[in-house]
Amino acid sequence: MSLRTNYDNSRTSFPMYFGQRTKFGDAASTPLKMIKLQVEQQVNAKFPLIHQVATTMTFKNEHNRILEGALEFTLPETATICGFGLDVDGVVVEKEKARVTFEKEVRKGIDPVLVEMIKGNVFRTRVYPMPVGSTRIVRITYQDQAQMENDHFLFHIPIYFNTTLENLNISLICTHASTDCQPQFLSKVKFQQNFVNSNGRYCFESHQVNVKSSQDEQSVTYMLKNLTPRQLIHSVEIDPDDHSQAYFALCYVPPLLQTNNIVPNSQNSMSICILWDASLSRANLENHNHEISMLKMILNTWKLNGNLTIVVFRNELEEPCSFNLQEQDYWSQLDHFLTNLSYDGATNLFQLATLSTTIPNTTHYFLFSDCLSTIGNDEPTLLNNLTTKPIWIFNANSAPEPIFH
């Protein structure tokens, strides 16, 4: 996190960066001291794929001037912010709605707090005022994905600071856990006590004073065993503000095949159709090279016979192109074709539904796309005929930016 002041061109930084293993700061920064840190994490063992973390930080202005600036913080890569507070709690709303509310409060003479997503998982907010000798409390709540490893779920909670804390409080809660599913610490941080079970609710608390920063790992990691591997994990959440709205989540990891022979004795029977998205959102050259290299590796491994069909699409379909895989220089022709495509226009995935009749002999589809359909009919049933055949999806694009901030 950083706080850039508007005084003397100096910069005062909040010395904390979520999701980073290195401490934040540079030679031009004057640290704004964090004196207290409280981290609260909670997970429901019935649906352990997502856990919630609330980090509360107390900063003190030990400088001889009032500070005003921009606070920036980065969440873990897979996290989603769901709450923010500067001395009081805030809520997450759509960006335009937040700006309207913000401007109304400013006109009232109130100093509101507006958090904006800059890019990726980097957020920024204005912090004012920071009176001399005073403290401000910043609270950030986010939900993060658990890591799955064999039959365990891993929960990684960052606890980063580079000052000596007056107080460090950690609270971890795992609800609806059975006696055979006790959480176990994996991090290098050593605690004198473990989780305590109280009627299926495992709790851990740590309260420390005068805690010095460490060069070692500043995080807490624990694991929770999945007692029913390969079983469906699902959950239903009811909107507390509108009980007619519900959200359903499902996770299922199918068992791996016991053989590496992906295409046994099928060289003569397979007919592959490549669906190549050439819309503007896929204009990154480096990503194309990754995908082309992967395609070459697959074709070299499978050693298929017959023809390979390629259909380039954007907002409209192009005419199919065919390459004879038995020709000695087929790859140079195919590589030249793919590397010289122009990327422009929108994406209409649903027009692919017609391919099941125009190219009826296809046995496998390779779809190279970010799968962000921007125009056309959005009725999923249109793709039913296409999905009767196996579809392999390749996407080297980075994660798209969300529409709402």
Image: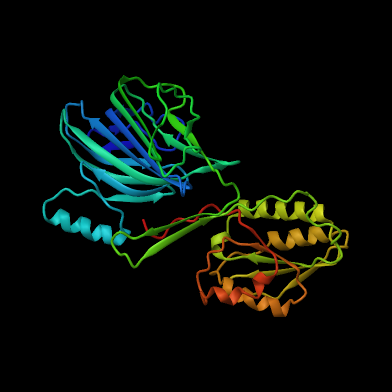
Q: Which residue does the image show at 67% across and 54% down from the upper left? A: 291
Q: Which residue does the image show at 38% across and 49% down from the upper left? A: 118
Q: Quadrant of residue 202?
A: top left
* Image quarter of the C terminus: bottom left
Would you say 221 lies left or right of 336 here? left
- Residue 87 visible in the snapshot: yes
Residue 209 lies, in percent from the top left, at: 29, 21
Would you say 289 lies left or right of 88 here? right
Q: Which residue does the image show at 37% across and 46% down from the upper left? A: 142
- Residue 316 visible in the snapshot: no
Q: Nearer the viewer, residue 108 or 331?
A: 108
Residue 278 lies, in percent from the top left, at: 61, 65
Report the number of discs: 0
Rendered position, 402 above or below 72: below
Colour scheme employed for the rendering of this structure: rainbow
Q: Nearer the viewer, residue 46 or 275?
A: 46
Residue 341 lies, in percent from the top left, at: 66, 64
* Image quarter of the N terminus: top left
Q: Residue furthest left?
A: 109
Q: Quadrant of residue 368?
A: bottom right
Residue 236 lies, in percent from the top left, at: 42, 58
Q: Quadrant of residue 16?
A: top left
Q: Nearer the viewer, residue 226 or 187?
A: 226
Rendered position, 386 above or below 46: below
Rendered position, 317 above or below 183: below
